[in-house]
Image (spheres, grey):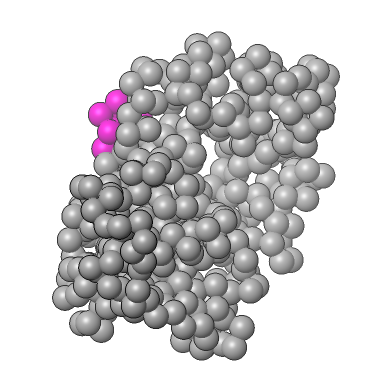
Amino acid sequence: MKITSVETVQLPAHPRHLWVLVHTDAGITGIGEGTDKPELTKTAIHNFCAEIMIGEDPLRNEHLWRMMYDSANYTGYMGAEMRAIGMIDMALWDIKGKAADMPLYELLGGKTVDKLKVYNTCISYGDIRDRELFLNDAGELAGSLLDEGVTAMKIWPLDALSEPTNGQYISRDAVRKGLEPFRKIRDAVGGKMEIAFEGHSRWNIPMAVRIAQELEQYDPIWYEDPILVDDAASYKTLRESIKLPILASERFVTKYQFRHLLEQNGACDIVMFDVSYCGGITECKKVAAMADAYHLPVTTHNCGSPVLTHVCAHLLYSCPNTTLMETVRSLYKTYADTITDLKVDIRDGYIYLPDRPGLGINMREDVLSAKDTVRVCTKAVRRDQMFAVSGDPWAQSPGDTKAGKIEISV
């Protein structure tokens, strides 16, 4: 089997999302998804990944991951290139599952639990206004989630308060007022609801400590990314100064960055990775194993469509140290039916997977053929004019150009 083309798909109604389709000469197509900065990632997919992938055997996941990583690493592997690698890697695993006629979780080691518990990240979309609710009536929001069987939720009530000082100062009184949603949830439903605090890396260490001290009374399930993640040692400093469990971080990339975090013994209590940002299923499975060696649970960052949600579920089902999985009900309960051939199956607070081969989910044909769908397909490259994948990057003349790439928009 050989890869014949790499295609990206964008939907105007969902501008933060990008999907990739990897096509083969066996008629098998794999799918992957990434979120945020889609135009940058799209460029990396077509002008970087496709040149490496086309003509290769899609079943050689490890080999292809290393080829892409080695090429990206020459100029710095973080950012669009890594998101592109992550999306391509998802699609390769989907192809592998379809070729084997097995659900992806089986190829990753099989299910380690019978059902996977989810939590709700309170984003607003369409008629479901969870963000406004957590800011204004968090108790009502918690009650509505419990009615659906969801017993854990994540909110970020202090983000706006970081803006006046760029996160360098917040008074204790302002912290107490900002944490009112936590109080309202506890008053309304008591301990029936687990609450996670999302910090979005908005604060310096002293203010993160102050916030944690005020947050303790509400017994949050974790304290997520309160500070920047560009220095793993800073997380150890913070962890030694507070009592709350720390979750880190969707912003770390590859096993190499997570190694630095894990080597700071006690720097975090829960490991989170974004499957696209971090480098795909291939890399995240290794990060999960590394965390397991430190007796730490893992979860995935997931604010994507049903495609990315299924990627995360297949991966987490196969990890013995999986904890709660992030989901967004305002996404999976609204537009899921409009773009994919399968609903996200969440019942009574748990996500379930189909026994279909691969990821078990595809984009609907009517969506792919719609007039406003933007499809770009790289079908061929001239390998004799490619920039070196590895080895001597100046093996070619600086005047050489890539040729043979065919792009079509539908």
Across the whole image, how many numbered discs are drawn on residues? 0
Name the quarter where the N terminus is drawn: bottom left
Q: What is the x, y in percent for residue 401?
A: 36, 66
Q: Is residue 104 part of the magenta span, yes or no?
A: no
Q: Which of 87 and 239 is in front in this view?
A: 87
Residue lying at the far top of the rendered structure: 241
Where is residue 322? Give x, y as percent.
36, 42
Q: Is residue 383 visible?
A: yes
What residue range appears in magenta?
Answer: 289-296
In the rendered image, the vertical position of residue 99 relative to residue 228, given as above or below: below
Q: Does the magenta stretch mainly form a helix, a strand or a loop?
A: helix
In this orientation, which residue lies closer to the viewer: 300 or 150?
300
Residue appearing at x 23%, y 47% in the figure:
392
* Front-lying residue, 9 or 314: 9
Q: Where is residue 302 in the image (x, y as percent from the top left)?
A: 50, 52
Tell me if residue 371 comes above or below residue 386 in the rendering: below
Residue 372 lies left or right of residue 316; in this view the side is: right
Question: From the viewer's perspective, is 39 left or right of 173?
Answer: left
Q: Is residue 223 visible?
A: no
**Image height of 240 relative to 69, above or below:** above
> Measuring 25% from the left and 84% from the top, which residue is drawn there?
27
State the residue at coordinates (47%, 77%).
376
* Residue 78 image point, x, y percent: 43, 43
Please tell me whether residue 110 is drawn above or below residue 362 in the rendered image.
above
Q: Which residue is drawn at 82% across and 23% down?
A: 174
